[in-house]
Image (cartoon, rainbow, N blue to C red):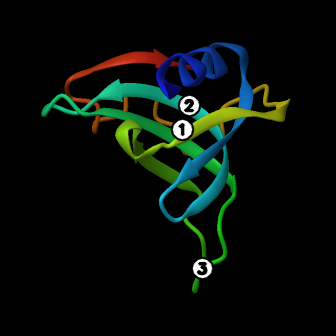
Amino acid sequence: MPFYTIKEAIRSGLRLKLSLPDGEHVVEPHVLGRYRSGDTLLRAYQIRGPHQAGAETRWKLIRLDHIDHAVEAGGRFKAPRPDYKPNDATMKGGIIERL
């Protein structure tokens, strides 16, 4: 289950490799929380993603039930990325873990 891997990565500042339906993403996880519907969400800064047309979005909002697998990608990050919002307004159901 990716929940505990993601929670620990936020606490420790670890980069993660996520397997999503559209491919593999390497991210720096910043906020884990819940949407008002109860869905668990991850707000992460994407370092690398699958090739796609157009510019990649750096900030990603990912539903945990869309993550097939989450593992440490190697490397740490020490500080939040620009435009980090610790009180992410999307997490109306509550924040579980944040930087």
Task: Tell me the residue that label 3 is attached to.
Answer: 52
Question: How many C-alpha atoms fall within 10 Å of the one at disc 1: few (<14), some, or many (≥20)?
Answer: some
Q: Position of residue 85 (x, y in %)?
A: 46, 35
Q: Nearer the viewer, mark 3 or mark 1?
A: 3
SS for dot 1 = loop
Q: Amino acid at mark 1?
A: Tyr
In the depicted structure, whether residue 52 falls above or below residue 59: below
Q: Are marks 3 and 1 in contact (CB under 8 Å)?
A: no
Q: CA distance from mark 2 to mark 3?
A: 24 Å
Q: CA distance from mark 1 to mark 2?
A: 8 Å
Question: How many C-alpha atoms fall within 10 Å of the one at disc 3: few (<14), some, or many (≥20)?
Answer: few
**Of pointers 2 and 3, the one earlier in the residue sequence:** 2
Q: Position of residue 42 (x, y in %)?
A: 44, 36
**Of pointers 3 and 1, the one earlier in the residue sequence:** 3
Q: Residue at x 71, y 15 (%)?
A: 12
Q: Amino acid at mark 3?
A: Gln
Task: Tell me the residue that label 1 is attached to.
Answer: 84
Q: CA distance from mark 3 to mark 1?
A: 24 Å
Q: Residue at x 42, y 47 (%)?
A: 61
Task: Tell me the residue that label 2 is attached to.
Answer: 30
In the depicted structure, whether residue 23 falls above or below residue 73: below
Q: Nearer the viewer, mark 1 or mark 2?
A: 2
Q: Are marks 1 and 2 in contact (CB under 8 Å)?
A: yes
Q: Position of residue 35 (x, y in %)?
A: 22, 33
Give 52 or 86, whichever is nearer the viewer.
52
Of all residues, the one furthest to the left in this rendering is: 37
SS for dot 3 = loop
